[in-house]
Image (cartoon, rainbow, N blue to C red):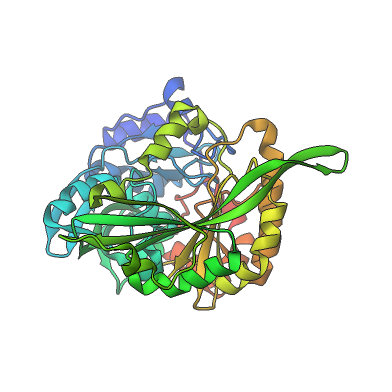
Amino acid sequence: MSLQKWNTEIIKQHKRETGQTLLKDEQTLVSFSQDFGKLIQSSPSAVCIPENTSSLQSLITFAHQNKLPVTIRGNGLSQCGQSLPIPGGLTLSMRHFIKPLDLQGDIIWIEANTSWADLLELSLQQHKAPFVLPYNCNLSVGGVLSAGGVGSSSFKYGAINSNISALEVIDGLGLKQIVNKNSPLFHACLSGQGQFAVITKVAVELRTVKSFVKTFCLVYSSQEQWFEDIDKVKDKVDYMELFCSPSIQGAKLKGEKRVPMAQWLYGLHLSVEYGNRAPALNDVLSHLKPWQVINTQEETISSYFLRHNSRFDTMKMLGQWDLLHPWYECFITTKVLKENLAELLQQLPLHYASLVHVAPMAKRKQGFLMLPEEDSICSFMILNPGVPDILKDSCLQAIQNLDACFLQQGGKRYLSGFLGQDLPPEYWSTHFGDQFSLWVSLKKQHDPVGIFSSMLYQPHKLY
């Protein structure tokens, strides 16, 4: 079904019928015209920033009745257009939905645009925390759940969205409802990229945590030993971070040009919670064989959860935050990773793969987060701090090469990253596989007009 556009007359009609003023000044429209990826630009015709659920519901009802496109935007940290409107569309900013609401036992209710950091500020007072946290705790809860969520405890507890008990949502008909794990709409909204309903509130499941964390930082020169020790240590630690880092060793000839060459090293950061007594080195590393143990450190658990803030602050200070971010994220089997990693690292351009992250994943998920069929899986991620435009094409080519390797071997892209340009018509049916018919059915049931759209999900390219 074709959608109308938010033109001047429609905007005036919306004001008359709802009493709400939409923003359409040039400064506002420009500020909402790109996302964190900065690889796609699309300016909205208007922006709505509701202050409460009632105002938001009025907007969705009006959009449904008049067949008008709406794009949900949290903090705009998507990379492939999820938070950008289609031409003639409206951006719905969730800016004001930022309050933690109620903590009872092992559940905390929060508004959808609350950051994970603000959630922690409340939950840690009772020595509670979510089972899995994203690397960037400044992300909004709703934004992460719309994608899925990966963190340093995913090897134990799976995706972030597998640890949610209920949602308050407003669907494409303008109906507000609270849905739980027994509801198909609940599962559709998790990893649903904002295509089925607006998430307004979230019930996050919590676990009891200790006050401190000790981290052991290991480096390996042998990829085989690295993989072997990862398997050995999983039951001894609470958090793991894995990455491959290039040690630049001058330049080599490639054709008639010289390009940087590197010796790849393999990092393994192991973290353990504790109360009164910190674990000793041998408590954790007794059966491991790293090349070097380069650091150990102790800190509060809050400090540990926010450990990546310094990286993001540096990106902003150096201007990298304003560059392009063609991030790559893909779920693959551990077998595929072991068979292909060495060759891929040699092929990746070092200006793109300045660090390659690997996150082992327990196969626990909810919603439309697509994972490989095998049980032993991980997330392969390139989260470059920022790429200048002149290097964009080589980075996009690297993404194509990675997809060519992983997807034909059962890999599934994590839809948080940049998927590429001009996706083919069959992209979504291939990605969702046997779940695609359910995806389409739930879309037609809960958003029959198709108002929820974005530059990631353009209506004419879906089905």
The quarter in which the N terminus is drawn is bottom right
**Image-quadrant location for residue 424:** bottom right
Vertical side of 244 occupied by 285: above or below: below
The quarter in which the C terminus is drawn is bottom right
Q: In front: 353, or 433?
A: 353
Q: In front: 42, or 353?
A: 353
Residue 363 visible: no
Residue at 25% across, 61% down = 273
Q: In front: 51, or 245?
A: 245
Q: Is residue 137 left or right of residue 395?
A: left
Q: Is residue 11 left or right of residue 267?
A: left
Q: Position of residue 24 (x, y in %)?
A: 42, 26
Q: Position of residue 405 (x, y in %)?
A: 69, 63
Residue at 62% across, 31% down = 388
Residue at 83% across, 44% down = 254
**Image-quadrant location for residue 313:** top left
Q: Kindly give the residue lying farthest to the bottom in the view shown.
A: 374
Q: How many numbered marks appear? A: 0
Q: Is residue 45 left or right of residue 216?
A: right
Residue 237 visible: yes
Q: Position of residue 239 (x, y in %)?
A: 35, 61
Q: Position of residue 127 (x, y in %)?
A: 15, 57
Q: Kindly give the residue lying farthest to the right in the view shown.
A: 256
Q: Kindly give the residue lying farthest to the top in the view shown.
A: 26
Residue at 52% across, 39% down = 385
**Image-quadrant location for residue 338:** bottom right
Q: In front: 272, or 405?
A: 272
